[in-house]
Image (tube, rainbow, N blue to C red):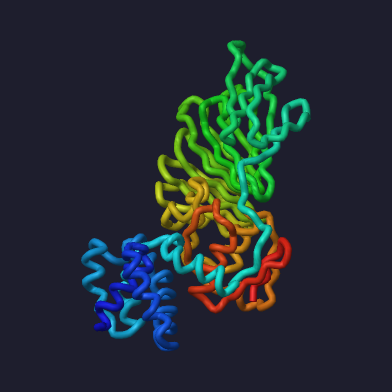
Amino acid sequence: MEQEQRDLLLYDYLSGVLSEEEMESMERWMEENEANRIYFTEFRRTFLKMRWGVRSGLVKGTVVQMRRKMQMRTIRRMSVWVAAMCVLGIGLFYMSHAVQEKGALETVAIVQGERKAQLILSSGESIALNGNGCQLTEVNGTTICVDTNGAVNYTVSGEEQTALLYNTVITPRGGEYSVGLADGTRVWLNAGTELRYPVVFAGNRREVYLNGEAYFEVRPDESKPFIVRAGKVRIQVFGTAFNVNNYTAGKTETVLVEGCVSMSDATGEVKLKPGQRGVAVADGRGIRVDDVDVHTYIAWKNGVFVFENQTLENIMEQLVRWYDAEVFYAREAARWECLSGEMTRYKEIRSLLYYFEQISDVRFEIKGRTIVVK
């Protein structure tokens, strides 16, 4: 078999488009000798690692055109053409067999997060939001509808409201939830997040308080600007979609998807355009603005993890928050490994860890609810 033909078959094998007979043929080739196994391992590692080229626009053209360019004589040449666009799910046939046969990771009790939260009413009463639908009434007559799909919604009574009553939704580690505010604004809360907001917005502005991470789709109302207070940072909008993250103490990050927002702190104020990120750090240096791929920052809201050239330490912070686990670094240098990957948030964590093992020298071990990084 010529090298070009073999490489294209390997590409199709990893993409999951070969027939059963062709897949068996490639697996026989892999098992022929150690050199073939090593070649396949390196091919797959580069294929997965370099797939971001297409999605980020580094490579143009169709997949068919790119496959024609895959005339590799070495693995290095493959990385030049960047022939892959895929997600973690490709190659599941091989991965599932490898996990079962080689025991790459221990059986793990760490499960993915789910839709759950606590709702604290203005009276201080705490209601568990765990998938059971119910209807509540606040003291000002506002109806609170909790549905079975992980959302709480508010319906204002016909009476004019002047006093501000506050509710709070808290998502624990391993939880997420959605809130429909009284003005029609929708907020998605990531794990480990607290949102405090008025039951009804009275006066000439709408103001909420956030600790954690949330995605906002604000109902436009020019007469009542919408304000998010995240620590010492103030984010003001009139109607737009954006993500706010202040998990890290002293740091607030806003990524604008559409519309216009302003961020302000003690150093001043900046305005963001769609596709920009504003980062306010409590160091007195002002708010930094840069252009970003917003998909990376809002994918969590759509049930997907997207890591693009992030340090393993940053990745693990997100994973342990969602899977309600702990992490221990047996090798400190592993913290600074930069990795890329994409996977649904509703899969077991071992799938993602196995993938990271294939594209790096990092190894993982599960001990109870602790992930040991080696």
Rendered position, 180 above or below 291: above
Q: Quadrant of the C terminus?
A: bottom right
The image shows residue 106 at horizontal and vertical percentages of 65, 68
Q: Quadrant of residue 207?
A: top right
Q: Quadrant of the N terminus?
A: bottom left
The number of callouts visible is 0
Relative to 149, 195 lies left or right: right
Rendered position, 85 above or below 5: above
Rendered position, 272 above or below 4: above
Look at the image and tell me whether residue 231 can be seen: no
The image shows residue 88 at horizontal and vertical percentages of 46, 62
Q: In the depicted view, which residue is nearer to us: 1 or 303?
A: 1
Kindly identify the residue that appears in the image at 42 percent across and 88 percent down.
33
Kindly identify the residue that appears in the image at 55 percent across and 42 percent down.
235
The image shows residue 156 at horizontal and vertical percentages of 59, 18
Relative to 232, 355 lies left or right: left
Relative to 183, 292 lies left or right: left
Task: Report the residue that reaches farthest toward the right.
Answer: 124
Q: In the depicted view, which residue is nearer to us: 289 or 93?
A: 93
Q: Quadrant of residue 205?
A: top right
Q: In the depicted view, which residue is nearer to us: 149 or 282?
A: 149
Look at the image and tell me whether residue 363 can be seen: yes
Rendered position, 62 above or below 206: below
The image shows residue 313 at horizontal and vertical percentages of 61, 67
Task: Report the residue that reaches farthest toward the front.
Answer: 21
Kindly identify the residue that appears in the image at 70 percent across and 62 percent down.
326
